[in-house]
Amino acid sequence: MNKNKVPLNYLMLLLVSILLNVFLFYMIIRNPNSSFFDEYNNLIIGIGSGILTYIITLYLTHKFLYSTNDALCNDLKVLSNSIEEIEDRTKPLPKYFMDIDNTLNILQVEEKAMVSYDRIKLLKTGFYKKLYTDAKEVKVLGISLKKFIEALFTTNHTIINQLLHGRIKVQLLLLNPNSDFVKFLDSQEGDNHDRHPVSDKLHEVISIIKDFYNLNTDCKTKHDNKIEVRLIDETVTLTFGYVNKHLNSENIMHLGLLFGHKEGGPLYRIPNNVEDELYKESMDYFDTLFSKSELNILFSWDNKGKHFTELNQLGKKIENANSI
């Protein structure tokens, strides 16, 4: 993206030089009988004004025209380096489904698809409430989904209301705190104050889900409504969100970048017709991960009630099957 940027410094210098010459030419024509001293003063004033205009214009243009674009480019560069490091250090793990380099190239081209440069700032704007209202299907993927899980299970969330009174199916995927990838993330992000920041955050999220399970355990959803939370052991480098609306069957997909940001990060809305079939690949990516995590169902809630599985009991079915 930066390679195609207009060389602004030279362009502005050229424009200021042209304006300066026009100004001086005008002053000479306007007063041809003026003395050399007058012309000298005009020349000094013209040059000073030109230099000052050049500096101010260059500063304001860089600050307001290119700042967001440059920051995005830098973040994408940091993200690419982070992903390369993650891939190198996690080769024993199954390779994630989607081609990240291809995804980043498309997102850079599709700048108009950016919803927000910092998705955390969307939390108090009503963006997510509007997004999930009147939804009939929701799919969400992330490392811990902490902000989302907190809002979902500790507030009067629109998704919970729809589970009780409307028609909706919800699938949530977050990382297994016991997975190799989480251990790797802990080693990268841990410090003397918190050696296991990622796994600790995941345990907090699981605790929130368990508290919700213990609240009215026999409560049932309406119709065939269902929400299911699964844990995955895969390498995850993108957040994914999909909402299918009742009204006009509107499909909304968002992708967010996870690495290169302490918190937040860009959020993109991906149109269904985006090139290289990114939309379809993203859907397949989620469905593949959800299918792989069939034995790691942490929590579910349907018309039969709530169900919760302790973390140390996940995957026991396959262990028992292998021992027979």
Image: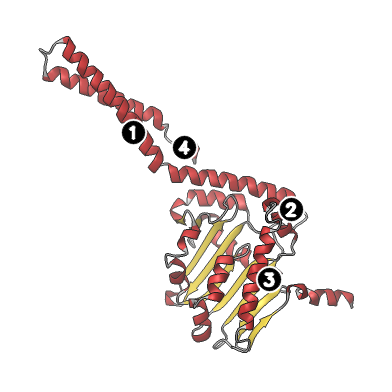
Is tag 1's residue or tag 2's residue first in the polypeptide sequence? 1
**Regarding mark 4 in the picture, which secondary structure is present there?**
helix
Relative side of 56 to 178, left or right: left
Residue 4 is marked as 4
Q: How many marks?
A: 4
Q: Is residue 236 visible?
A: yes
Q: Quadrant of residue 179?
A: bottom right
* Crowd rating for badge 2 (residues with CA inside 10 Å; few <14, some 14–19, many 20+): some
Residue 292 as seen in the image, left or right of residue 12: right
Q: Are marks 4 and 1 in contact (CB under 8 Å)?
A: no
Marks 1 and 2 close (CB-CB < 8 Å): no
Front residue of 62 and 255:
62
Lower position in the chain sequence, tag 1 or tag 3:
1
- Label 2, on which residue? 90
Could you tell which of marks 2 and 4 lies nearer the N-terminus? 4
Determine which of the numbered discs, if any, sits on residue 56 in the image: 1
Quadrant of the snapshot with the C terminus: bottom right
Furthest residue toward top: 36
Between label 2 and label 4, give the one nearer the viewer.
2
Q: Nearer the viewer, mark 2 or mark 3?
A: 2
- Residue type of the residue flagged with mark 2: Thr
**Kind of residue indicated by mark 1:** Ile
Sequence-first disc among 2 and 3: 2
According to the picture, the residue beneath numbered tag 3 turns out to be 291
